[in-house]
């Protein structure tokens, strides 16, 4: 047992009563990271000196007689390496950004720091957040702490592992097609994909600008609420950010589900889902019904086209966003290129990995003359249909529930040779990104010793409903305090 086995709420209580200081808590977190991360590979770099300075500042604030302290004051956290951090190398898991040290921090990180959170460093991810397994990082393979021969899920795999392995209390990740929810499910933590615009994207190294969203990964649903309350809100530097009220998230945690209309999308459940995952889902649904939820089957008929539409729209935005990456100011350099064009080609070939090159090529193709209408425009029409499906179904129910992923964490290397099988990992998560609705994954049980997450989706700006249902699932499952136990197989608590 370590201090970071406790929730943020419990740690905050210990800090306020003087049971331990933020400096002691941060020292413990850094020591634990040095002990376990060599095997897991969650961190690309730690910022121990800066973290200790932040912790000392937090202790000074804790010593002041004030009742307005942030619940994150003095709490160790870490950030996915696609979020710019002032003065700290930020690479997005790519060699083409080697040596890039931002002169500013992302708004989400600024708000975490303003709340007194202690940043321990930058976390590994799929290159430019493109991947479902965290195997596309240019620098290292991150391993699932529940079984180190398994992937942690992507692209925010380092964020999920750092929380699951008790190296930090919370981490920020990003979700473009499931990149928070999928690793949360695979690693047995809570992951929130807020509604599009709920959290500022300023300072996020963009993958697909109309799909990306920043969100928290934590051990508990309440901890996720505390982090989201800090990072959410309007930002003048992001024209897509929203001023819509967040609502009473912590109040929603206690509301229960009695009378709540919960929909089960028949298209999601008709997909090929592992028996163990389905068992956890079925038992959880029965428990929700016993708690008073009104369950019904609903339809999202455009789901079958969502994957194809996503893998046209997202690569198209990739080809545009990554056009600026030329290797001139940072990255692997030009080698002995004879001219400027050859220099660019050399830098991009050396700097981008195969998955990023694949998506750039695909995106350039679907945007090219003669193919724009046939692919990109048609995909945007499908996106509209997907959004309309959600709008219609949320007139019938308050939220939706499904497995987060069709499977538990698969073995490292198992899907690398088959991109389509890898893309299919996101079948249950990416429709929410196309529609921009709110969603989260909450641990609900185990299958074959590996965590299983359930996905809760709610209307646009409906995060409070997500937290209401997720808190009930968490309470029923009673598993958040179970930590990864090496290679020992756990029987599912459900």
Image (cartoon, rainbow, N blue to C red):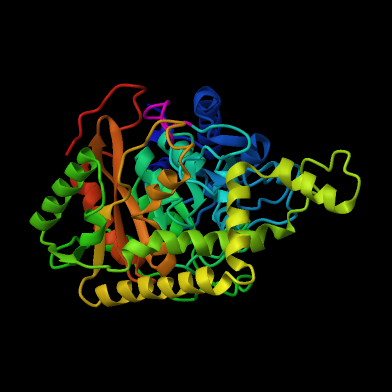
Dividing the picture into quadrants, the one containing residue 55 is top right
- Left or right? Give the position of 310 relative to 140: left
Viewer-nearest residue: 374 or 302: 374
Q: Is residue 149 magenta?
A: yes
- Left or right? Give the position of 176 relative to 265: right
- Left or right? Give the position of 404 relative to 289: right
Q: Residue at x 61, y 61 (%)?
A: 365
Q: Residue at x 20, y 64 (%)?
A: 263
Viewer-nearest residue: 318 or 153: 318
In the image, residue 24 sits, relative to residue 390, either above or below, namely above
In the image, residue 52 sits, relative to residue 358, either above or below, namely above
> Residue 34: horizontal and vertical position, in percent?
56, 25
> Residue 265: horizontal and vertical position, in percent?
23, 62
- Residue 328 in view, yes or no: no
Q: Residue at x 84, y 48 (%)?
A: 343
Q: Quadrant of the N terminus?
A: top left
Q: Is residue 240 magenta?
A: no
State the predominant SS element of the stretch in magenta: loop
> Residue 92: horizontal and vertical position, in percent?
63, 47
Q: Residue furthest left?
A: 290
In the image, residue 173 sits, relative to residue 432, either above or below, namely above
- Residue 257 in view, yes or no: yes
Task: Please provide the residue range marked out in magenta.
Answer: 143-151
């Amino acid at each position: 047992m370590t201090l970071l086995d406790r929730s943020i709420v419990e740690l905050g209580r210990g800090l306020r009563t003087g049971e331990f200081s933020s400096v002691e808590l941060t020292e413990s977190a850094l020591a634990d990271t040095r002990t376990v991360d060599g095997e897991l590979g969650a961190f690309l770099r730690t910022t121990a000196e800066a973290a200790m300075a932040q912790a000392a500042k937090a202790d000074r604030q804790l010593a002041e007689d004030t009742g307005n302290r942030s619940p994150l004051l003095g709490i160790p956290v870490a950030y996915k390496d696609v979020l710019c951090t002032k003065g700290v190398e930020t690479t997005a898991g790519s060699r083409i950004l080697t040596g890039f040290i931002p002169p500013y921090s992302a708004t989400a990180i600024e708000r975490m720091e303003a709340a007194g959170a202690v940043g321990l460093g930058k976390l590994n991810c799929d290159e430019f957040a493109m991947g479902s397994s965290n195997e596309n990082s240019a620098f290292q393979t991150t391993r699932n702490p529940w079984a180190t021969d398994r992937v942690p899920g992507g692209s925010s795999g380092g964020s999920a592992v750092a929380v699951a392995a008790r190296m930090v209390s919370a981490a920020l990740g990003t979700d473009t097609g499931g990149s928070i929810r999928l690793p949360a499910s695979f690693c047995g933590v809570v992951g929130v994909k807020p509604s599009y615009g709920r959290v500022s994207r300023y300072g996020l190294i963009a993958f697909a600008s109309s799909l990306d969203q920043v969100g928290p990964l934590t051990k508990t649903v309440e901890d996720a609420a505390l982090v989201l309350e800090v990072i959410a809100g309007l930002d003048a530097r992001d024209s897509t950010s929203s001023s819509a009220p967040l609502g009473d998230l912590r109040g929603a945690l206690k509301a229960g589900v009695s009378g709540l209309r919960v929909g089960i999308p028949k298209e999601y459940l008709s997909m090929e889902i592992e028996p163990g995952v389905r068992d956890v889902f079925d038992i959880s649904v029965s428990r929700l019904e016993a708690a008073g939820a009104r369950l019904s089957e609903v339809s999202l008929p455009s789901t079958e086209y969502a994957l194809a539409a996503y893998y046209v729209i997202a690569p198209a935005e990739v080809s545009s966003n990554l056009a600026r990456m030329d290797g001139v100011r940072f990255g692997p350099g030009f080698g002995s290129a004879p001219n400027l064009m050859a220099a660019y080609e050399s830098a991009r070939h050396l700097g981008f990995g195969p998955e990023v090159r694949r998506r750039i090529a695909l995106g350039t193709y679907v945007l090219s003359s003669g193919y724009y209408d046939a692919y990109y425009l048609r995909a945007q029409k499908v996106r509209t249909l997907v959004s309309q499906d959600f709008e219609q179904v949320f007139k019938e129910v308050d939220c939706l529930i499904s497995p987060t992923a069709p499977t538990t964490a698969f073995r490292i290397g198992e899907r690398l040779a088959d991109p389509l099988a890898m893309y299919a990992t996101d079948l249950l998560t990416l429709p929410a990104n196309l529609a921009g609705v709110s969603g989260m994954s909450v641990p609900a049980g185990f299958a074959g010793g590996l965590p299983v997450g359930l996905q809760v989706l709610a209307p646009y700006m409906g995060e409070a409903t997500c937290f209401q249902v997720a808190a009930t699932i968490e309470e029923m499952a009673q598993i958040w305090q179970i930590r990864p136990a090496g290679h020992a197989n756990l029987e599912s608590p459900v």
